[in-house]
Amino acid sequence: MKIAYYPGCTLKTRAKNLEDAALAALRVLGIAAVELPRWNCCGAVYSLTDDDLIHQVAPVRDLIRVKEQGAETVMTLCSMCYNTLARANRLMREDEEKRHTLNTFMDEEPDYHGEVEVHHLLTLLRDRIGWKTLAAKVRRPLTGLKVAPYYGCTLVRPRPVSIDPRPDQPTILDDFLRALGAEPVDYPARIECCGAYNILSEPDAAHRASANVLASAERHGAELVITSCPLCEYNLGTCQNQVLPHGEGLRPLPTLYFSQLLALALGVGNEELGLELSPASSLKLVAERISPIHQA
Amino acid sequence: MTLFIDDRRIDCDFKEKIRELSGQNVALCMQCGTCTASCPMSADTEVVPRKLMQLIQLGLREEVLEAPLAWVCASCHTCMARCPRGIDITRVMEAVRQLGLRENVDHVNLSALPAEQLRDLPQIAFVSCFRKLTA
Ligand code: SF4
Ligand code: SF4
């Protein structure tokens, strides 16, 4: 199976591990992710004011690039790119007036009507591969590993672009973890915010929000938190040392991208997972808790 | 906070301006406070989401634009997901931010950040922060 792939800016640098691990895992699953030959930044956040149409141009251009390739579906890995592209796509499908304005403004581009389907790797795994098939490909079962699935905001809100039919009680990451043989941890903060871009403007407030998420996961027995967004991964993992003092008795908690755990379970070698970009505690967890490859 | 409402300070068009930008009718808000209870960012702010809605209903433009809430809002969409009146409060926050930004004032100062952090932060952190907080 071939699929058009939109990486987004962060996956080419700071979150190279999110991409590398996902692409390695997809190779094992027999899926060729074909990166769009041309793409631009999606804008990271979806524009929320009715008269601010100029900020819809960037994500819509990306969707036109997908259509140009003759592809019906585009895969994203970053939660923020997913959210922005999926919402811009819905706008082009549903709002006739804004669609007309945008198409007229981009008169050098072919008209776009929201023809493309925007997917996240998780929805592709669920809908095109299936959890059973995925489970059958696991070579390094994560048996006994207690993992907190962190959904955050952009995978599940707002409802029309949620990757799970129940955005208030999502299970897609839990199902994903079960397929890998791990034990998903149920904890209340799974759909709460990590503080997002406030890390730049109001770092204390962001650290408090992240501490709340980590404390909730830890209280419910998590050994590891998995994320799908480079900003969540930064707030919860990379700068965890600054977060810990904001939660009483909070201890270091390893974090990994969901794609790293997927690749690990599928038997991809550690050297392809970009673990050097992950927090030190995560490296330690992989070395100590995840058993070596099971030889078939 | 005791609020003295002086009719000379009421801007009757303000609610309409917010509606024009956000597409939301704040008059629907029944002041239940669900948005405030759901908000991860307003623990330290005096004007919480419910209160901001009330200030907009009253047409108190200055109080709304001076409240720090829209500048700490993380656009997490939790309030909009839970509002029993179906108001997209996240869009209302964006409308308030836009009105502030259109005065050409930035609300983030990157030169205050440590070099190590600037080196490690993901690009989407900068792009989203600039989109939300710079004019
Ligand atoms: S949740 Fe909705 S109705 Fe309740 S106070 Fe907030 S905006 Fe008003
Ligand atoms: S979108 Fe903003 S105001 Fe609403 S709950 Fe999230 S941080 Fe609070």
Image (cartoon, helix red, strand yellow):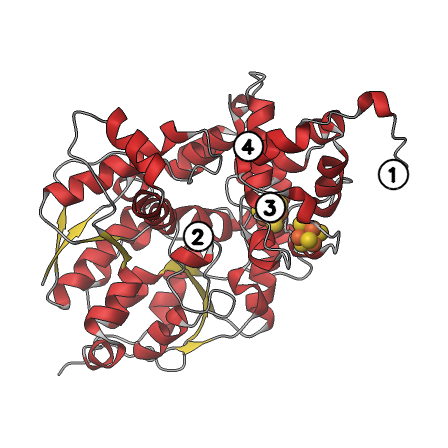
Give neighbour class at mark 4: few <14, some 14-19, many 20+ (Cα, 10 Å). some
The amino acid type of the residue labelled 4 equals: Glu
Q: Closer to the camera, A249 or A29?
A: A29
For badge 2, the amino acid type reads Thr
Query: Disc 1 designates what residue?
Result: B1
Instruction: Mark 1 vs mark 2: tell me if same chain.
Output: no
Q: CA distance from mark 3 to mark 1?
A: 22 Å
What is the chain letter for disc 4?
Answer: B
Mark nearer the N terminus (3 vs 1):
1
Mark 2 residue element: loop
Q: Residues within 10 Å of mark 2 (few under 14, many from 20)?
A: many
Foreground label between 2 and 3: 3
**C-beta proximity under 8 Å, tags 4 and 2:** no
Give the residue at mark 3.
B89
Residue at 19% of width from left, 65% of height from top?
A: A268
Tell which tag, 4 or 2, sits nearer the viewer.
4
Mark nearer the viewer, 4 or 3 = 4
Horizontally, residue A15 falls left or right of residue B104, namely: left
Instruction: Give me the C-alpha separation between circle 1 and circle 2.
Output: 34 Å
Q: Nearer the viewer, residue A49 or A208?
A: A49
User: Which of the two discs, 1 and 4, sits closer to the camera?
Assistant: 4
